[in-house]
Image (cartoon, rainbow, N blue to C red):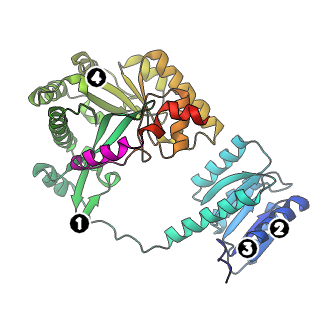
Amino acid sequence: MSSPTPPVASLLVVDDSAVQRERTVQTCRELGVPLIYEAASGAEALALLRHLVLTPDLMIVDLEMPGMDGIELIQQLLPQGLALPLIVASGQEKAVIDSVETLACHLGLAVLPGLKKPLSTAALGAALAELGSRTAAATSPPVAPGPAIDAQALAAAIADGSIGVHYQPKVDMRTGIVRGVEALARWPHGGGFVPPDRFVALPESEGLIHALTLSVLRQALAQAADWNAHGLRLSMAVNLSPRLLDRAQLVQEVTDLVAEHGLRPDQVVLEITESSVVDCMGAALGVLARLRLKGFGLSIDDYGTGFSSLQQLARIPFTELKIDRSFVHGALQRRNLRVILRSALDMARQLGLVTVAEGVETLEDWRLLQALGCSVGQGHLIARAMPADELPAWLRRHQSILHELRAEAANETL
């Protein structure tokens, strides 16, 4: 029986320590990598790469080296046309490795999770397997680009009701029970859905954001009323564009829609991105204060990605703090993210705010948030956004895993 094909066919090990380099090379051989290059410094690695006809599939690079260190080497790759994937392998503290990985990602390089030296066969094998998975995904048949979209097409879609709403569940972190949903606009177009990032800026730049927001809000409130009638009372979160915050009549428009559907304002949470409220002054502050006075919940969305975050919490009567996914997913492995996450949750508790964590992707993320006392979780571990008619079936499936998600189950496994 033939042995399985190794995840990579060739790689380059860059390390000034002959002992560490040989150990890494031997580990790679044990994992079945057939062609392994070596370099004892950054300069030697660059010289070797310039002369190779085929660039290696991967580079494993140390950070502390005489002359050109590993960081300088990484910074030199793209300018010289050497965009190869890499693994940072170092005896340095995890925070330093994480920083170098972030740098490499910003430079546009493919980066696999960093490894502490000495490398173990299991850890390196997992990294090589991940690279193999990424390569396979990258070589899959490309998805045809969606149809061109413009302001005229968007205006027509809003007018004829083509833009629908999907709902992503938000669940209690202690019990796993569903507490609410976030309403997200979805535009079916050309046989599929227009990705939100392709049309999210268009309505704002073309003066269509008011019509789009009211359309989404109207559909979401009608759905909430229908769920209420069937005994399912969920909070409904709807995104509010900063372009609408200087519109004095917005408060009455939203209030009228809520009353029209027989709902109470306290069932509706209006989400405003942190970066959009940095310059909230005058009329915008008045609109937000009036919405809160009416009883609507106000959420500061994507917390941690904007500026002057503490100032916004002091100036605006928020009821909820929604922590950006970049501080949630992977925080268990990255101490700096974990410290920031804990600090944000502690501060929110002292301010009496509900805390919502976005980007809950794994059970590890979930357990960490439980341990840190987060109130509500949202992410692909729980559910992706779905049409309203799919929610009942999802709820039935979700009921079967509540024991695994609740905090008592987590404590049993600690």
Label 1: which residue? Answer: 191
Q: What segment carries the magenta color?
A: 384-401
Report the residue at 71% width, 55% height from top.
88
Alpha carbons under labels 1 and 4: distance apart: 39 Å
Alpha carbons under labels 2 and 3: distance apart: 10 Å
Which amino acid type corresponds to the residue marked 2 in the rendered image?
Answer: Gln
* Label 1 or label 2, whichever comes before in sequence order: 2
* Label 1 or label 4, whichever comes before in sequence order: 1
* Label 3 or label 1, whichever comes before in sequence order: 3
Q: Position of residue 208 (x, y in %)?
A: 19, 45
* Label 4 or label 3, whichever comes before in sequence order: 3
Which amino acid type corresponds to the residue marked 1 in the rendered image?
Answer: Gly
Alpha carbons under labels 3 and 1: distance apart: 44 Å
Relative to 119, is 133 above or below? below
Q: Position of residue 397 (x, y in %)?
A: 34, 47
Mark in front: 1 vs 2: 2
Side (left or right) of 354 relative to 69: left
Q: Which mark is residue 32?
A: 3
Q: Residues within 10 Å of mark 3 (few under 14, many from 20)?
A: some
Could you tell me which secondary element the residue under label 1 belongs to?
loop
Alpha carbons under labels 1 and 2: distance apart: 51 Å
Q: Position of residue 249 (x, y in %)?
A: 15, 26
* Label 4 or label 2, whichever comes before in sequence order: 2
Q: Which mark is residue 26?
A: 2
Report if residue 400 lies within the magenta region: yes
Side (left or right) of 7 relative to 379: right
The residue closer to the viewer here, 265 or 104, is 265
Q: Residues within 10 Å of mark 4 (few under 14, many from 20)?
A: many
Which amino acid type corresponds to the residue marked 4 in the rendered image?
Answer: Leu
Label 4: which residue? Answer: 288
